Image: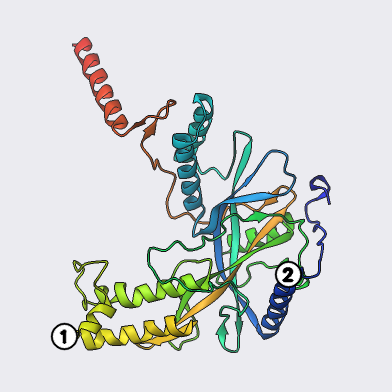
Amino acid sequence: MEHRDVKPERMRRIVVRFPEDPVESVAEADALDAAVGIETLLVRGPLFGVAAQDAGEASRWRVVVAVDAGCAQQARDSLQSQLWFRAKDDAQDRAERRALLAAVARLETERVDDLTVLGTRYRVVRAEEYTGMGRDGIEQPRPTDPEPAAPNWDRGAREPKVDDGLVLDPDAPITPTQAAERLALSGLAYAGSRYPQNVRADSERAVRTHPDVLLLPAVFRVVEGDGGPGWKIGSGLHATAHDVRKTMDFGLVWLEPRQHGLIAWNADAKTVDARSVAAAGADPAAAELAEYVRVADRLRAERANQVEFQGTVRRICRARRLVRWGPDGPEGPRPSDVDTHGPEKMHPFLDEDGVVHFDHEDDEDDGDAKDAKDAEGADS
């Protein structure tokens, strides 16, 4: 289907393909089993990122800022930084740098959701985060979700980034379970009195203006429950379940002991944690810290997706994201979406020659003061 043939309120055709290899076939069967066990969907709310469309591309967009920000302005800020550093480090000449800096200037003062820079179109993209809920609660990682063959627990190790290298292509062939999920979620809209009327109206309008949905790769985060009916979010999004386990391990052996006064904040950050203190045994808190270590060691030894500590269940949640899609591409922020802050200048002044001026504003202020003093002297 050509991009020009896609019209508002009309879904694009979905091309279904068979799994390409045995590994994908197993993942397809795993997805089918998971779908059977899901009784309802929990919708957390919107996430935002930035996608770029290069000249000549009809429908494909590259994700250049991961779709994991809590508000659209955070995605705009990330784009501002990306363009600023490109101007500083990668611009080939003054004309290219000038174009990049012009875009940066707009992002410093405006809520820009769509702009073109040097032939590439950038758009702030809105996604809906959701997860499945079954008899056992929120869905956990599936057996076929990516896991490292040899887990690296080094805190400084580089882990896969969310949406790294992701290309959004609504016309790409997909497997049967992916097609079924896309069709099932095409009519997803907010309902119920807990959503304000303008939020419900924007959601219902988006079903018409962006009738297709595109499913992004699964992501993972910590959720916490205390036996009540709900779960609360306990971490940001990660590309793999292993990375979430590392986050949970760090919280149990490093961060929480400091927060609870069991380890001093000024203790050596690299060598002092619950494991080292519990192993030494001399500290009065050693016995209590050993309980932190016991729970954290389960994450390492068992690749556990759930642990319980001090009355709280900590579970790795398998989260999904969908992007609504219309004739002009992915959906952007809605009028009812809320930003936590406004546009702001995030970097020092960069001139057209690529020179950073950290004192540029001070120089301008001094100049303004001098002009005002000269004018005052002229009036007198």
Residue 121's label in the rendered image is none
- Front residue of 126/299: it is 299
Q: Is residue 47 left or right of residue 208?
A: left
- Front residue of 96/79: it is 96
Q: Local crowd at mark 1 within 10 Å, few (<14), some, or many (≥20)? A: few
The amino acid type, in three-letter code, at marker 1 is: Pro
**SS label for mark 1:** loop
Residue drawn at x 24%, y 83% is 278
* Residue that numbered label 2 is attached to: 178
Among the two numbered marks 2 and 1 on one chain, the one whose residue lies closer to the N terminus: 2
Q: Position of residue 221 (x, y in %)?
A: 49, 72
Cα–Cα gap, marks 2 and 1: 54 Å
* Residue that numbered label 1 is attached to: 284
Q: Is residue 228 left or right of residue 145?
A: left
Q: Position of residue 39 (x, y in %)?
A: 66, 84
**SS label for mark 2:** helix
Q: Position of residue 342 (x, y in %)?
A: 43, 47
Residue drawn at x 32%, y 83% is 293
Q: Is residue 369 left or right of residue 33?
A: left
Q: Quadrant of the C terminus?
A: top left
Q: Position of residue 329 (x, y in %)?
A: 70, 50
